[in-house]
Image (cartoon, rainbow, N blue to C red):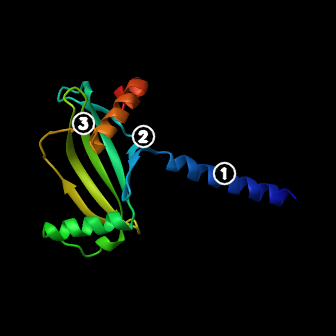
Amino acid sequence: MLKKILMLSIIFLLLCNTGFASERYLWLNSTDKFSYFFDEQTIRYYKNPDGSRNPNIINVWIKNTYNQDGVNDCIKSRIRNHLLIDGWEDLDYSLTNYLFNLDKNSKKIMDSISYNKYGVKLETYQSSSKWYGITPNSESDLWIQALKEYAANNSAIMKNR
């Protein structure tokens, strides 16, 4: 009887830990091809060159998961842009580091990493891209609104990361 209780306790703890790990990413939105989540553990205010935090700019990693139609669209886009497609049929998700300027309603991509369903990196992209304005009612507009709300409710945590 003691063995059964011990085994059930271990299984319960393992299940609980798995559930907590999946809560790292909070849902932003989904389409018929993609789902987007932001990393709650690393979201923070941008650090200025002098080391101070800028509460007008949010630094966040967004996870983009793909269903098969999303994978197919990605492959088609890579073909149009003359990029390699070997291994991309197994695309599972991408992690992209964005800066969102809350005052100017704009975004900037810093880095992006794509992974296959086996956890192997397909591609790493580093950008020195310019800032892009966010179109009202667009997907990015949904994101920035959700991130503004999160920042308003978690400002103290974000300042200390």
What type is the residue that disc 1 sits on?
Answer: Leu
Q: CA distance from mark 1 to mark 2?
A: 21 Å
Q: Say if 139 sits above or below 123 in the image.
A: above
The circle drawn on residue 102 is none
**Left or right: where 140 falls relative to 14:** left
| CA distance separating discs 1 and 3 | 44 Å
Tag nearer the camera, 1 or 3: 3
Tell me the SS state at disc 3: loop
Mark 3 highlights which residue?
A: 136
- The quarter in which the N terminus is drawn is bottom right
Q: Is residue 120 visible?
A: no
Picture coordinates of residue 64 (x, y %)?
Answer: 35, 54
Q: Secondary structure at mark 1?
A: helix
Residue situated furthest front in the rendering: 137
Residue at image position (27%, 46%) is 97
Query: Dividing the image into 4 quarters, which one contains the C terminus?
Result: top left
Q: Find residue 81 and report its horizontal and vertical position in percent.
A: 13, 66
Residue at 26% in and 32% down: 46
Callout 3, which amino acid?
Answer: Pro
Taking the spot 23% from the left edge, 50% from the top edge, the residue there is 111
- Sequence-wise, which precedes: disc 1 or disc 3? 1
Mark 1 surroundings within 10 Å by alpha-carbon count, few (fewer than 14), some (14 through 19), many (20 or more): few
Q: Nearer the viewer, residue 41 or 87?
A: 87
Q: Is residue 58 positioned above or below 95 on the image? A: above
Numbered badge on residue 41: 2
* Mark with earlier residue (3, 2): 2
* Number of the label disc, if any, that sits on residue 13: 1
